[in-house]
Image (cartoon, grey):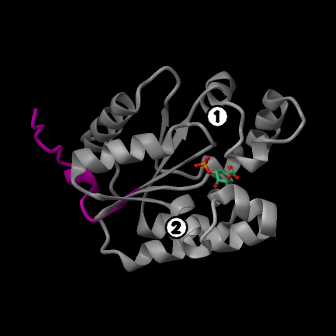
Amino acid sequence: MAHSRDSLPAAAGKNLVLTGFMGTGKTAVGQNLARRLGRRFIDTDMLVEELTGLTVARVFELHGEPYFRQRESEAVEMLGSHPPGTLVVATGGGAVLSESNRSSLRRHGLVILLTASVQAIIRRTHSGAERPLLAGGRRQSETVAALLKVREPHYRDCDLAVDTTGKTPARTAAEIIELLNKSSWNQS
Ligand code: S3P
């Protein structure tokens, strides 16, 4: 069945940038949003994989996290080469750790934080095999809680926050469109 496209007047001219911890649904929600809005979807992890010719897990394994973060910052900078308002972007969960990434993301779009309960994050990230930071020996809930504590203030540097716990990506995407189009939305 053909679906009519959603419109997003409140965010015309602005990219939609999804931030948030691993397992909050950035990629699935971003793909859904892009489809609804007729925008291009870009995932910074996929850009890193294109830049390096390696999976994210292999980049961590062969070169370490600092190297990954440098490539991730290059990926964030590359977003600026697209016309504003044409993209939905999913960022890696640690992209907001860098001040320059944060200001670059704010410059290019509306930053939308996705959140989820620790239990939902653990359920969605399974074994953590594709996510090197969750693959260690510590109890996963402790690892997630410790990383969240450090990252929380950076995640809160956003235009909008949406909890995804117990929601499908389609429902979260619909909620984001509704929130952005609310007349009370501050477009400054
Ligand atoms: C990371 C999140 C991952 C990926 C890398 C590091 C992080 O992306 O960038 O494994 O530091 O939180 P997702 O958030 O898409 O899983």
Per the image, the residue denoted by label 2 is 47
Q: Secondary structure at mark 2?
A: helix
Instruction: Name the residue rendered at 63%, 60% in the picture.
Output: 55
- In primary-sequence order, the first of circles 2 and 1 is 2
Per the image, the residue denoted by label 1 is 125
Mark 2 Cα-neighbour bin, 10 Å: few <14, some 14–19, many ≥20: some
Q: Nearer the viewer, residue 135 or 163?
A: 135
Q: Position of residue 13 (x, y in %)?
A: 27, 65
Determine whether 166 is above or below 63 in the image: above
Using residue 122 as the reference point, say whether residue 25 is left or right of it: left
Using residue 80 as the reference point, say whether residue 1 is left or right of it: left
Q: Secondary structure at mark 1?
A: helix
Q: What is the magenta range? A: 1-16
Answer whether residue 64 is visible to the viewer in this image: no
Determine whether 35 is above or below 170 in the image: below
Instruction: Name the residue rendered at 82%, 39% in the picture.
Output: 146
Determine whether 82 is above or below 20 in the image: below
Q: Is mark 1 within 8 Å of ligand 1?
A: yes
- Quadrant holding the C terminus: bottom left
Using residue 3 as the reference point, say whether residue 177 is left or right of it: right
- The question of residue 13 being in magenta is answered with yes
Q: Position of residue 84 (x, y in %)?
A: 32, 70
| Amino acid bearing label 2 | Leu
Mark 1 Cα-neighbour bin, 10 Å: few <14, some 14–19, many ≥20: some
